[in-house]
Every structure is written in C-alpha cells, then in structure tokens.
Amino acid sequence: MKKHVIIIMMLFTCIMFSQTKKNGTVYNEHPAINAVETMMQAYFDGDADKVASYLTDDFKAWDGVSTNKDAKGNPKDNFLNGVKWVKENLLYSSYKRTSGAYPDAIKYKGDTGLWVQTWDHLKAIDAKTGVRIDMPIHRLYQMTDDNKVKSMITYDNDLPWAERRSSFASRTNGTIYNNHDNINTVRLMMGALENGDADKGFSYFTEDATFSNLDMAEGVRATLAEEKEGFLGMLENWTITSIDVQGYPDYLEYELGNAKVVQSWWIARMTRKSDGKKVKLPLMMTHDFNDEGEITGENGYYSLRVLSVK
C-alpha cells in the first residue's frame, strides 16, 4: 500500500510540473520602469510636454474597470489634456509608490512585448469641492522597444471621483428637527443623570449600546455596563449641581444610510466632595437611535481630565 501511495505522489508531482511553463522574465529594475515613473511624476507636476515625450503617437489610455464593451480608449491628445486638468483642479497632489510595493517590468516571450505594472497611491484635494482623493491606483503600461508607452490601463476606485462630481450640485440629505421624541429622550436621559438616577438614565439605551469619549483610544468603545459603572464611580467623588443645555438639541434624520442622530450641547456643573472644588465640564454629544426610539450609541466630545484639576 505504501508503495502505491509513493507512486501516486510521484505521478501527481510529474503532472504538476508538466503544467508549468515559463513565458518570460520579470524585472524589478528596468529602464521601462524609470520611464513610466518619470512620466507619471511629470503628469502630476503639470508638465504636458515631458509627458508627451514618453508616449507613442497611437497611445491609448484605458479604464480597467469599465464595463463599456464599445470603449475605444482615450487617445494621446485626451490624455495630455488631463495634465492640464490635474494642474488646475487638484491641490497638494502626491503620487508615489504604495508603501511596501514596487513596480515590475515583464518581458513576455514571443511578440507580446514588455509590460510595466505599478502600484501607487494618489493623495490630493479637489480645488473646487474640497473632496479628498486618497486611494491606491494600479496601472499596466505596454511599452515599445525604445521604452515609450503605447497603452496604459488604469485600475482605481471611482468613489472619490463620483463624490467630486456630485458635489457640484446642491442636494438635501434628510430633515433637521428642533422638536422630536428622540430629542425628548435625550433630555430625559440627561435629566436622570443630572439627578444621579443611573438606572433611569441608562434605561433609554439598548443593551448592546456602545459609548466613546475623547479620553478613549481610537476604535475603543465602552459597553453599557462599563459606562454605567464609570458614571456611578464618578458620583462617589463628585456631586452634579446641574447639567444645562446650551442652545438647543437637533435631531437629524438622514436619507443616506437612514441614520437617526440627536446632537446636543451641555454644561455640567460639578462639585468635588473632597474639597468643594467646582468645575464646569463642556459636553458635546451625539446619540444614535434605532427605529424604536432607543439609543444605540453615544459619542461624547468631552474629556474627563478636567475633573483632575487641583
């Protein structure tokens, strides 16, 4: 039996090796790599003449994620117009290799020529809308023997560009209320906490609600039990004199994402039990709601470090 297994494994290995075939050479250093990187830096520097010197007359630029079956590619003149567009429309542009990545030059056997593939990162701010462009871009360049670019295929994320396009037209994104049941819930919750009624105050939250404030590390959120415990611990050392609303709360019912958010501003006036020290703690709060009118999350834009004042 063991002999049969060995024979089968040898046959499998032979089959696997017989299915592999070399079809060229991959270079991590090549004049063609230098050519495309120099060209793209000139592109974002706004030097159209320098870019043109690296392109063949029949150059075409292609969108690698387009579903248009009739696409014919953008010719050289259109691509060079893009140099002017970048110069006029993008601020603080940076086009560099993606961290940890490097380009390859691939020389295929036969008549398919040389291709350069790159992984880069574009950062910029749109000059008219302020939309931030911050994304990776993968490109393939078909090269001639004299290291000119015959075609370029770009794979990138259209979402930032779509955001830019949509930013030119004004549109609404829901309704703002200055009176609403969800605002009432927040006022009732804050009123209960003002009076030290933790059970009542935290009853307005769902069991899986989470909490954050400016003292927490990024991405860290407290559970309902942890937040309640922290509040009760604070009451052991501090007396809440009042929690006064500043201005008035807003309830925002968004169209995008169907989010339901109350944002409010407060001043908590507190007295330290040990020495009678009085402090005022500014609070800016946002509370997320579900369809049942329960609070599912709290984001507190405040720092409890003020309570350590001497």
Image: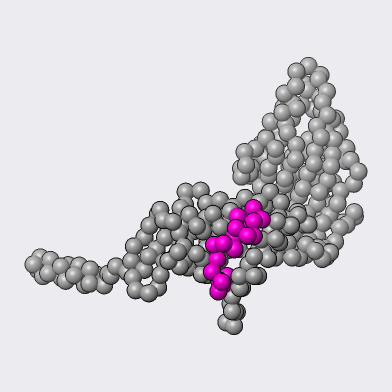
In-front residue for pair 133/72: 72
Q: Residue 9 in the image: x percent, y percent?
A: 17, 67
On screen, residue 102 above or below 167: above
| Viewer-closest of 238 and 5 | 5
Identity of the residue drawn at 40% across and 70% down:
113
Q: Picture coordinates of residue 193 (x, y %)? A: 79, 39
In this picture, is 30 found above or below 213?
Answer: below
Q: Residue at x 59, y 60 (%)?
A: 51
Taking the view exactly as shown, the residue that stands out farthest to the bottom is 70
176 falls in the magenta region:
no
Residue 37 position within the rendered picture, expressed as x and y whole percent measured from the top left: 52, 55
Report the span colored magenta: 42-66
Residue at 86% over, 51% down: 250
Give the camera-side residue of 131 and 88.
88
Q: Residue at x 71, y 51 (%)?
A: 91
Q: Is residue 241 above or below residue 275?
A: below
Quadrant (top left/top right/bottom left/bottom right) for the N terminus: bottom left
Count the labels in the image.
0
- Report whether 80 appears left or right of 7: right
**Snapshot quadrant of residue 114:** bottom left
User: Residue 61 is drawn in which quadrant?
Assistant: bottom right
Quadrant in the picture for residue 253:
bottom right
Q: Is residue 63 magenta?
A: yes
